[in-house]
Each structure stands twice: as C-alpha cells, then as structure tokens.
Amino acid sequence: MAIHSGAPRRATLDDAERPKLDQLRQALAPLRDEPGTTLEALYAAQDIFSYVPPEAVTLIAKELRLPESEVFGVLTFYSMFHRKPAAAYVLRVCRDLSCHLTGAPQVLHAFNQALGARVGEVTEDGLFETESVSCLGLCDLQPALMVNLEQHGPMTADKARALLDDLRARGAR
Amino acid sequence: MSSETVTLTIDGQEVQVPRGATVLQACESIGVEIPTLCTDPRLKPYGACRMCVVEVQPGPPRPTASCTTPAGDGMTVVTDSQSIKDIRKHVIELQLQHHPLDCPYCDQAGTCELQDEVFDQEIFQSPYETVPKAHPEEILNEVILINHNRCILCGRCVRMCDEQIGVRALDFVERAVGTFIAPAQHEFMDCERCGMCIETCPVGALLSRPFKHAARSWQTEKTASTCPHCAVGCSLLVESRHGSVVRTRSNGLEEPDRGILCAKGFFGHSFVNSGERITEPLVRRNGALQPASWSEALNVISAGLREVLDAHGPQAVGVVGSPNTTNEDNYTLQRFARAVLGTNNVYSQSSGLHAAARTLRAVLGSAAGPRSQSELLESDVILVVGADIGQTHNVVGAHVKQAARDDGRTLLVATRLASGLDDFATVAARVRPGAEAVLLSALAGADIPNMHALTGIDADTLTAMRSRVQAAGTVAVVWDTGVWTLGKAEAIAQGAANLALAHDGVKLFPLPERANAAGTFLLGMAPDLLPGARPLSDDEARRQASDAWGAPVPAEPGLAFDDFIDGPMQALYVMGEDVVGGSANPQGAQAALERARLVVAQDIFMNATTEAADVVLPGATFAEKGGHFTNFEGRLGRLAPAIPPVGKARPDWEIVARVSAAMGADFGWRSHEPISTELAGLMQRPSLPGSRESAAVNGAAPAPADGFVLATEQHLYTAGVSGRRADSLTLMLPEAVAELNAGDAQRLSIAHGDRIRLSADGGEVNLKALVADRVPPGVVSLPDRFLEAAPRQLDPRAPDGAAVRVHKV
C-alpha cells in the first residue's frame, strides 16, 4: 500500500468501457493466489479491451498483489500486448527465416492490398490490423500467422483473402 | 563439505574465505581490485554489467561474473588476463553508445563510477557513434528526475527500491536497446521519495532535483552527522558549500540505518538555510520584539531571573528542554536549572515517549529497555501496533519489511491505516483508532467482551495473531509514541506491558516521536528525575549530581508543567520548544506566559512561544553544532558542525552556558566535548524493581455510525517545525490535508482535492480532502500538518480516536 495510492489518475477509459474493469476483476479471481500469472492476466485484459489500458495495469497489480511497476515492465517487454486500442483482429504474420522463404511476404502483401492499409494501421471499420512479427514458434505451419491467439497456416495469398472474408463474417467481437 | 571456509587461488595467490562468499568478495579480501558497476554492498549480487568478469578454472571456458559466482575449493581465478581487460574495455565502450560525455554539467561528476571506468580503461573517445535515447530526461516527481541517456541499466535503483525499501516503484520497461527505467505507467505513484535510487545510481541518471546544478561533488565539504528528523537517528553525510547545506546523503552501512534514508533524511535539510531562521537576539521593547546585541539580551535575562529568584524564590522559575536539541543542550539547561537557579521545575515536551517509558518502568522495572534494533529485527515475531511505522519511522519500517521477507520473521500488523508493511505481513489487520491498548491486552490473553466492536478486528484474525504470538520464542512489540498517543500513551504502554508479563519472550520497542525524545527522558528532563533517568528521590543520585555540579540539587521535586505555569511561574526559559502551540490549551498557555515576569525562548524559528516571549535567542540547527542525539535504541548519534551558525545564532548549550555565566556561574565550557564527558559520568541507569502487575485496559466506545473516527498519525513527509521550513518536504505535502477512503468520499460527494470541514466536540478544522486507499472506511486521517490548517479550533493534541463529522464545504 503505497502512500500515494488512491489518488485519482488521468482516466483513459470512457464510460462505456469502465464496466469492463469488473469483467476483468472476475477474470483475475482464479489467478489471484497463483504465482507467475502476470501474462495470463495481461492476456485477459487484452481479450476484454482489445488492448491493455492503464486502468487494467493498476487493477492487475492490485488484484495479484504485485508491484505496479513490475506489471508495467512485463506489459512493455512483450510485443504481443497492445497499449492503444487495437483492431478486433490482429493478424500477426511471421517474418522470420523459414516463413519468409515459404512466402510470408506475399501473405502480408495480400493482406495489405485487400485491406488498403499498411502494417500497423487499423482499418477504418476497426476490424483489422497487420503486424510483421518475429518467430511464432509455428514453423510446422510455415508460412504461419496468428489471428489474435488463433493459429493459421500454411498460408498463401489466396488463403489470406479467404481468411479476411471468414473473419468479416464473424464480425466485430 | 562441512568446512566453514574454502581455499582458492587468485592471480597465483592462495586465499581462504568463508563458504558462501563470492569470487568478487574473495578478490576484495586480498586487495585485488575488480571494477564493478552494478554492485552495491546493500544489494544482492546481480551480474548485469559484466565489468567484474574473471576467468575461473575449473569452469566453463568463458568469462564469468565474479559477483554472482560463489568461491569454490580449489578454484583458480585469473582477474587480469588480456582477454579480461579487453572485455572490460569493450563493456564501457558499449555503454558510451548512449551515455553522453557531458560530465562538465553532470551532478554525478567526480563520484561517477562510469567516469572512473572510462578513465581507468583509457577510453579517450567513444569508438561508436553516440545514439541518444528518445526521452533524454524525465521528471519523475517533485524531487527526482531521470536522465535516460546517462542510464547504464545496471538496475541498482530498481533493486534498491525493491530489496532495501520494499516499495519497488521502478522497473525496467520496454526491451533490448529500447529498455529504460521507469515507474509504473510513467507515474511515480508508489514512490516514497527516499532518494535511495539517486543514492545508489552509479552515474548521473537518477538525480535529485533540489541538488541539480547546485555544486560539483568535489567542491562540497563533507561532514558526518546524524539526521535530526526522527528517533531512528540515521547517519547522515552533510554536504555544504559557502556556509549552506547543499545536500545530505546516507553515510556508511552501520546501525541503525544500515545505509538507507527516508524522504526526511535525504531531502529534509533545507530548513537549515531557510530565510525564516531567527538570526539575532530579540528583546521586547515597548511591547514589540526588537533586535538586540547578545550582551543586552544576556543582561536582560540575568537581571530578570535574579529579580524573580529574589522576589519569589526558585519555585517560581522553570526551564523547558527539547527533543529537537542535543543531549549536551538539554544537560546544560538542566544543570543551569537545578544547580544555578536551584529549581527542579525542569521539563521537556509533553511527550508520548516519556509517558510510555514511565509506565513501562513502573510495571517492568529495569527490564523496560531501551533495546537495540538488532533485537527487534531478530525476534521470531514482529508485531506493529497503532501508527504506520513506515511513515513515522520509515527506515525501521523498511528494515522490518526485509526481516519478514528475507529472514523469515513473522510480521503481524495491527495498524490503523493500511501500509506497505501489510504486503510483508503474515497477518495484517486494521485496528480502530482508540482500541490499540485493548488489542494489546487481548493479545496478552485478557478476556475482553465485545472485542470485534471495540477493535474492528474479527475473532479469527485475532486468534491468528494471538496464536502466533504465543507460539513464538521471541516477540518484538513495536509502536510509535507520536502525536496520536497523547492522552493514551500510558494505556498503550500498559497494554504492551501486559503482553510482556504474559509472555517471557516479549520485548518492547516504543519508537519516540522526535529525534532526541529518548535522550530527554534518559537525561532526566523532568521535575522528578535526574541524569540517567534516576529518580530525584534517590539520595545517591542527588549526591552524585551535586558533586558534579558543585552545588546542591534541591530534594523537593518540581511541579507538573501545567500546575507550574498556572501556579507559581514568574520566569520560564524555553529551549527549542513551542509550549504554547503544542499545548492542549494554547490560549491558557499564552495567557500564563504573558502573566509571567520573564519568558525567554531560544529557538530556530518563530512560533507562538517566541511571539509571547520577552527575549528571543537564536539557536543552532543540527548542522551548526556538535553533540549527540539518543535514538530509540538508546544509541548515541554524533552531530558535528557542517556550517557555522547563521547570523548571530549559537549552539543552544553555549547560549545557556553564557546565561549561566552572566549570573555568576561559569561552567567553563568552550566546546561541547567536556559536556559530553560530564554527562556520561552521571548516566548510570537505575536498578528498578517494577510492580510486575498486569492492569486492566478499557476500550474506547465505537464512534457513531454516521460519523468518522479520527486518526492523527505523523505523515512521512512531515517533520514538525523544521519540516515545514524544508522546501522539498513541503513540495511533497504542500498543505494540511484530511485523507478519506474512496467509498466514504464518494458517499459524501467529496472529490480528491475538495475542501472539507471536520467538526468534533472540540471544535472544527477546514482543510483539503485527499482520497487515499490507505484509510479504511469510517476513518478520517489527519496527518500532522493539520496543525497549520485554518481555521483551526480542533484540539491539536488529543483528537485521535475522537468521533468527527465530515462536511463538504
């Protein structure tokens, strides 16, 4: 219990988003007494908000009884966590050697052409965003990609366009 | 395997070290110098910087960090091969990619460990292009900033805050080349402003904002001294230049601080050079205090005292010493009173520590203590009751956290406010303000009905605490005796004594509220005591004092302070104390002072007492005089003058001695040393039997359901009068505040920063509300700066535990 805690901070969540903190609190309940659950907690927050807002970091630290600095350190260390609102579907295309050699650049190109957006840009409908990432550990699926936490591969340009149609059909989360 | 030592060879030299020592320690033990950057003797080995690499055989064929490698039997270590030298040089060259060579305007220059390595490795120019980081400088809070370009990512700040302070406000963020040090979300919410991240930083990355560009490190004079702000008595290195204190730092790793300080120790020194200091004697002429020469002031005082003694006798004269001044100051005042003026009307602040110490002596006798911090930290169970000692005695609080985490002590916390100690506790509970003594008696086994309603602690939690206390071999009971205990200090001490009587292993640690409160008690600054805190009724003690002072000490004890000022008082000599502002009845005390023939007040700042005085004398701060404070353990902390006194100010002992000389009794002292020697000779501790009787302690009634209970503990960023004149501390807590729980604040539509009015039977006070997680529901916390709030009619001394109402203004 730090001596300054409790003082209000700059609010980043709007009124529509704030109730999701309760949802996060519930999701954290089973993690509370388990050591080493920081990543799970951050994933839970990202799943609920599409990103990890500052309020979620504070809540995770409080609920898991961790220093907030440590939760923030973990959040910023890993590139798979978003700190700004992200698209409903983040398409993480592996760019490392084996995926590269089997056509990852063509897959990424197909996405960007179909979406009319560059890597890292969120499409206007808020549905998609592509990322070019380091090895996903899915070399058996080369060229591989992940849609949020869902694995896909081996990919081709055609499969990429079909995947977009499929995801559009699922709609925003 | 069972051998206590291991033998290894370092650079061809055989060396024996205790098992468990690191290779680095083994090298240091024979004077082999190994460069390090991420090592701090206060911190655990970490192995980040790779400067300390050595070659170890047998072992992997690669350079090994000596700081994290345990010395092993038969090891052969090479510390100075060409390849090792090359690695070290390359480590520094890589650091210079980000680290600018801006030493001419870096505060760390001269004490910078990287600067020394650049020199030692003979790197005259960085071989790489320097790539500055995106955010060169970030202000973290009122007093701390970080220069990311200079940061070498050794992690000492992160580990210091975690391992030593138990806060962990900082961590590494981002990764790889983009890594930097930052607080959570770039808001330094958890920081306790102890400055120890700055202290441990080997380079000029973490910086003190008050010290920024104030002086080059080699230009300052360094004086070893003792922190004046609380009874922990931390060692301090006072750095001064041109007669001003420019910074204070931690000094050495010894007891009691073990190498750390708190916000007050590190940032709380600037009151010394405050423009509000009293710098010359003032004498009341035509109703107004006006500057006067020392000789005029001394003449007025000696003539006035002589007149009162002749007309009314010594019973009409009294002196008040101070827990803010040294043993030598208080002793001189006492000797002057008892041996020169012939009165036992000798006082010091109406003090929680005095009340607690008297109660413990009466019950437990000589076994009452004081005891050392090591005994506290080595107890199986450490029980903290009442105020949050992380605020009142921050450094002891930090040590307690470490003892719980690293040494396996069981920490039981029964404080009124939530605190950082809770995170380290086996059982943490919130005790209702006013029920602390009842709780202690209950833990001692007393069967008290209605415990939950009285203390706010449920039966299961109480049982959990009680069983841990009973099962433990040794139990340290720790409580602050500060402002919140006034009016109930005896009851709390009796509760603690009950626990000690019920369990042989219980040791008591009352933590005094001011730097030298323990000293004033042990010196006998009381109407019925003598040096050594020996009873005045002890003929032998009186004879020894009379012999030392060359004058008889009257056998008749003095009056209680309130009886004295409302009774025979015609002259009062006050040294470093505000007897009016600190009184339960300030108007009454002021009237009494105005009725007196002569009031002399000797102090560093004006206050309600100096305003009412006939003569005001400029005293000296801790940085301007020699002497000693006695800390909570009974340990002497040495003060040494770092700067000459400002203006015409003089050390307090010297002023009193000059007054005495003006009255014909020259003690012959020209420095504080002979006083230290003389008083040490009189400090034999009395052998006291103690009643060994447990007494009932009654609980306070719970406050009404619609109201609040008041808690008035000292805040970490306050340090009495001097703290209010220390700029850095006033930045941290700029004004009087009341802290409320978020739920209560919401219920009353009070937002963080709103003005509120607290009203009680004793009056009301108007101040700023802060929403604070540490305050439990139904409690409103008034940190001690509420004394400045306006309008203030609330009894400043004893509202703790009172029922109050809260209104939004």
Image (cartoon, rainbow, N blue to C red):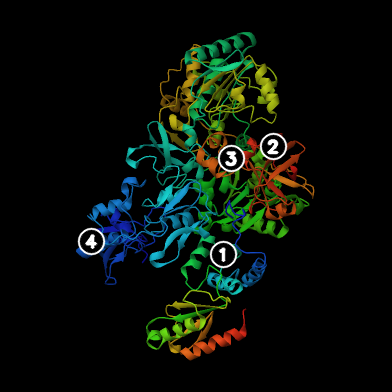
The span from disc 2 to disc 1 (Cα, nearest Å) is: 41 Å
Label 2 Cα crowd, 10 Å radius (few <14 / some 14-19 / many 20+):
some
Res. B179 image quadrant: bottom left
Q: Residue B368 bears which disc, if any? A: 3
Residue at image location 48% in from the left, 54% down from the top = B161
Query: Is residue B436 at least partly visible in the picture?
Result: no
B219, B419: nearer the viewer: B219
B241, B570: nearer the viewer: B241
**Which label lies toward us, 1 or 4?**
1
- Say what amino acid the circle numbered 2 marks: Ala
Q: Which residue is mark 1?
A: A57
The kind of secondary structure element at disc 4 is helix
Q: Which residue is mark 2?
A: B798
**Which label lies toward us, 2 or 3?**
2
- Say what amino acid the circle numbered 1 marks: Val
Q: Residue B193 bears which disc, if any? A: none
Answer above or below: position of B152 versus B278.
below
* Percent coordinates x, y for residue A15 in the rendering: 67, 64
- Say what amino acid the circle numbered 4 marks: Lys
Q: Which residue is mark 4?
A: B85
